[in-house]
Image: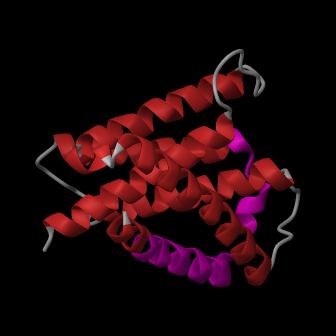
């Protein structure tokens, strides 16, 4: 589990760095996005990954790695929106947004560690394509929950699904990093 924790932190460090740099470029313009808009952004990225995995020809010179990073960062934005609500104008500076980012990641990493303990790191034997499919499944679940005005009868809420997507994307990035060595 120690290797997983270090690998997780290394992946998140790259994602966080990009998030901070984009905050410097764009500010917190993403704060105006409603949850379904963020869900759709994540869906687009997951669909592109699936397309890249299925098609031999690539017309845009960006691979799976940047898309998985995008999924992680958009999911964190969604978790922040769940907590703080949507605003009409950007309202967070880089420091505030980064603090929220770190809070959401700490909770999500703890969830990963708890599940990893119970599941025995089963994700290590999974294919990246399966992790992509699980992200897409979680997205379809989130869309359904959004269509149900956020209500569920017996299922976990939207936040848990975003956290799972983050963790699946981190696992995929760990796999992709290991396969490039």
Which quarter of the rendering shows the C terminus? bottom left
* Number of numbered markers: 0
Stretch of the chain drawn in magenta: 9-36
Find residue 129 and report its horizontal and vertical position in percent.
25, 42
Q: Nearer the viewer, residue 30 or 124?
A: 124
Left or right: where 56 falls relative to 132: left
Residue shown at 44% from the left, 30% from the top: 137
Q: Is residue 72 above or below residue 161?
A: below
Left or right: where 99 falls relative to 86: left
Q: Which residue occupies the extreme top position in the image?
A: 153
Instruction: Answer whether residue 87 is magenta in the image.
Output: no
Find residue 131 and report its horizontal and vertical position in percent.
33, 43
Look at the image and tell me whether residue 137 can be seen.
Answer: yes
Look at the image and tell me whether residue 27 can be seen.
Answer: no
Left or right: where 140 falls relative to 128: right
Q: Quadrant of residue 7?
A: bottom left
């Amino acid at each position: 589990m120690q290797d997983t924790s270090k690998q997780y932190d290394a992946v998140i460090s790259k994602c966080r760095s990009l998030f901070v740099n984009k905050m410097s470029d764009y500010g917190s313009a993403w704060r105006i996005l409603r949850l379904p808009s963020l869900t759709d952004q994540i869906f687009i990225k997951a669909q592109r990954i699936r397309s890249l995995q299925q098609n031999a020809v690539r017309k845009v010179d960006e691979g799976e790695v940047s898309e998985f990073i995008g999924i992680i960062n958009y999911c964190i934005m969604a978790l922040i929106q769940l907590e703080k609500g949507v605003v009409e104008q950007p309202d967070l500076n880089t420091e505030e947004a980064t603090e929220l980012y770190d809070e959401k990641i700490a909770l999500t990493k703890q969830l990963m560690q708890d599940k990893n303990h119970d599941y025995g790191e089963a994700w290590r034997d999974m294919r990246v394509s399966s992790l992509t499919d699980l992200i897409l499944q979680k997205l379809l679940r989130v869309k359904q929950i959004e269509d149900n005005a956020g209500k569920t009868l017996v299922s976990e809420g939207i936040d848990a699904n975003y956290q799972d997507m983050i963790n699946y994307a981190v696992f995929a990035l760990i796999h992709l990093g290991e396969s490039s060595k």
